[in-house]
Image: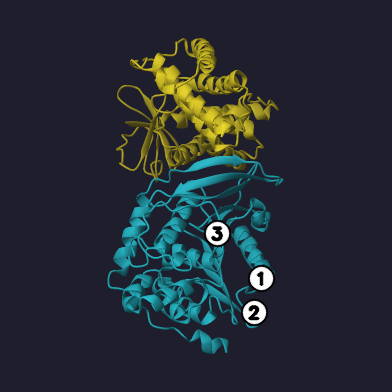
């Protein structure tokens, strides 16, 4: 069943200007001033210090997060992460497992969800169901474009803080964002993504799974805009950018996942050409391997950090 | 420029025709150089000019540089430039290298110098303090030391002093000014300011800007102003007059300058906003 599913490669849906579009965005990200603001925060961790940090997105929105670092000596690497759809970065203690194996952590709030990050850009599109429809008809201003470029800005933040080793980690929405940012900007040493979103988006919209249900609802109201919507979504589809990933990738899926179905991730996974591993949980849904998988990730990253010294 | 010492593949010391000694850093600069030979500078290399020593002293100078401290200072300078939205004098690299070398020597002799301004630096200059924290991590890692937040504050102060346009050591006066002024607002208006509240942060930033202006050697032009715009009643007017007089005394003590009428108004407006906010 797994092998059968993994052969579902699916067609790429790239527009002709896909690479130009993203190369332009990457250039903007690389040229953007970080305009960082740090605020020391009290934290009861024994070996870590915490700053609330904000970095400006391309449109000037302060993207807010935690910067957790070891003291008196820094961590051996920096792990960048964020949260699942509609959630928030939570408290610094939420990342204690990563710091326990020697990583410093940057964890940020995705725009307009339950955290502190807002949205400074004009909103011209519909708001049906959730934020995934915001500015849906224009790839330059579409909600997901900001999420992808914000994640790239976080990689820049990690680099600018002096880290030579950067690991991206995330689940669901966050897994998709990490794979996208790792593919587009690169400059990372490992990507860990669980039950990732944002792959094979056309089919996900047709089935109305997870956060993309709102786009299905939009198209039920405006069926004449399907072509336009699918064209915009193609710029953000992991299956169209997975071949740009150079870092090793460690992924997981739940074969009963109805939110980010495994079969929609395979078209992206199959196009990753860097060293990769996919762990399938046949009896699990969107929770994937949960804590059991987290332990595998911890073992993997602990060994990786030892290996790089 | 003539090479006078090769530290490693990426750092050399060189002297120019005016006998100014510089450290030149960049990929392969040491690998391709030979002592006493001319050094053709490449665009991607960085040049850090040191003090202008007597000609017969420069060997002592280049021999005394702790090159590991210098490399870390360069990293700290790069991190500071990325995260602070003002121009920083490149001399910071040399100043920090000297500071770090000295600190390491002190630690070897088990001497620790506390920083009495750590709490203020952490609150008033969080960005610089964070750069200081990262810097301390780099130093601790490189020299196997356990420097703490006191050291982060020292580094933050060095960075602030190297802000292009800043007066030497003005950070001490400005930090003291912010601290005393905030105490004055609390005392004169009987308000309790939570240091974590955004309104406190705004007032602190305005006082910091005022301190920076006061530390500038050139007094800014004063303007004719109408203080009635504050719409204060008689009691409030007396209270604000008294507050401005106190602030004036503080400015005189710390900066040897009186507050102009527009500076008093500026200060009053921001304090009034706090009072209105708290009163809401």
Quadrant containing the N terminus of chain A in the rendered view:
bottom right
Residue A127 visible (yes or no): yes
Quadrant containing the C terminus of chain A in the rendered view:
bottom right
- Mark 2 falls on what kind of element? loop
Do the residues under discs 3 and 2 have CB atoms within 8 angstroms?
A: no
Above or below for B16 versus A58: above
Disc 3 to disc 2, C-alpha distance: 22 Å
Q: The cyan chain is which one?
A: A
Q: Name the residue under label 1.
A: A290
Above or below for B30 versus A87: above
Chain ID at mark 3: A
Q: Which chain is yellow?
A: B
Chain ID at mark 2: A
Left/right placement of residue B218 relative to residue A267 reads left
Label 2 neighbour load within 10 Å: few <14, some 14-19, many 20+: some
Disc 1 to disc 2, C-alpha distance: 9 Å
Residue at mark 1 shares a chain with residue at mark 3: yes
Residue pictured at 69% horizontal, 46% vertical: A47
Q: Name the residue under label 2.
A: A284
- Mark 3 falls on what kind of element? strand
Q: Name the residue under label 3.
A: A82
Seen from the viewer's position, the closer of residues B247 and B11 is B247
Q: Which of marks 1 and 2 is nearer the N terminus?
A: 2
Q: In which quarter of the image is residue B230?
A: top left
Do the residues under discs 1 and 2 have CB atoms within 8 angstroms?
A: yes
Chain ID at mark 1: A
């Amino acid at each position: 069943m797994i092998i059968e599913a993994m052969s579902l490669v699916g067609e790429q849906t790239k527009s002709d200007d896909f690479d130009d579009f993203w190369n332009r965005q990457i250039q903007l990200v690389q040229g953007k001033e970080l305009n960082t603001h740090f605020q020391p925060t009290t934290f009861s961790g024994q070996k870590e210090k915490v700053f609330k940090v904000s970095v400006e997105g391309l449109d000037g929105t302060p993207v807010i997060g935690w910067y957790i670092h070891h003291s008196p000596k820094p961590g051996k690497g920096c792990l960048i992460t964020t949260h699942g759809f509609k959630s928030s970065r939570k408290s610094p203690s939420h990342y204690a497992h990563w710091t326990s194996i020697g990583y410093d952590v940057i964890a940020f709030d995705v725009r307009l969800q339950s955290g502190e990050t807002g949205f400074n850009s004009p909103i011209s599109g519909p708001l049906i169901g959730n934020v995934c429809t915001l500015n849906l008809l224009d790839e330059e201003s579409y909600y997901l474009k900001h999420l992808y470029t914000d994640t790239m800005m976080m990689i820049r933040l990690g680099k600018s803080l002096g880290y030579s080793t950067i690991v991206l980690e995330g689940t669901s929405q966050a897994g998709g964002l990490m794979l996208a940012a790792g593919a587009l900007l690169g400059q990372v040493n490992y990507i860990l993504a669980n039950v990732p979103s944002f792959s094979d988006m056309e089919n996900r919209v047709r089935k109305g799974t997870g956060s993309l249900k709102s786009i299905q609802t939009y198209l039920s109201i405006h069926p004449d805009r399907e072509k336009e919507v699918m064209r915009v979504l193609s710029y953000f589809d992991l299956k169209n950018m997975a071949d740009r990933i150079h870092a090793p990738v460690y992924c997981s899926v739940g074969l009963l996942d109805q939110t980010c179905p495994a079969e929609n991730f395979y078209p992206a996974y199959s196009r990753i050409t860097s060293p990769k591993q996919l762990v399938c949980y046949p009896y699990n849904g969107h929770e994937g391997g949960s804590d059991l998988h987290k332990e595998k990730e911890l073992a993997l990253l602990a060994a990786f950090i030892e290996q790089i010294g | 420029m003539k090479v006078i010492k090769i530290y490693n593949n990426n750092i050399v010391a060189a002297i120019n025709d005016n006998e100014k000694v510089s450290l030149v850093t960049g990929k392969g600069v040491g690998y391709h150089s030979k002592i006493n030979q001319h050094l053709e500078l490449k665009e991607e290399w960085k040049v850090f000019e040191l003090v202008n020593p007597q000609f017969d002293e420069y060997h002592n100078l280049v021999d005394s540089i702790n090159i590991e401290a210098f490399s870390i200072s360069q990293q700290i300078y790069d991190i500071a430039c990325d995260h602070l939205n003002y121009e920083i004098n490149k001399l910071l690299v040399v100043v920090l290298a000297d500071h770090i070398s000295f600190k390491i020597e002190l630690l070897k002799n088990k001497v620790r110098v506390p920083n009495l301004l750590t709490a203020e630096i952490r609150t008033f200059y969080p960005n610089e303090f964070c750069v200081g924290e990262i810097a301390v991590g780099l130093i601790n890692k490189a020299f196997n030391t356990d420097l703490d937040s006191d050291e982060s504050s020292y580094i933050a102060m060095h960075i602030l002093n190297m802000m292009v346009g800043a007066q030497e050591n003005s950070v001490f006066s400005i930090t003291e000014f912010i601290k005393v002024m905030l105490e004055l607002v609390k005392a004169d208006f009987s308000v309790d300011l939570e240091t974590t509240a955004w309104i406190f942060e705004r007032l602190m930033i305005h006082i910091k800007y005022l301190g920076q202006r006061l530390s500038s050697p050139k007094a800014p032009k004063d303007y004719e102003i109408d203080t009635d715009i504050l719409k204060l009643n008689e009691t409030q007017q007396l209270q604000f007059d008294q507050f401005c007089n106190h602030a004036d005394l503080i400015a005189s003590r710390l900066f040897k300058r009186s507050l102009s009428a527009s500076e008093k108004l500026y200060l009053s407006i921001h304090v009034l906003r706090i009072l209105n906010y708290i009163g809401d």
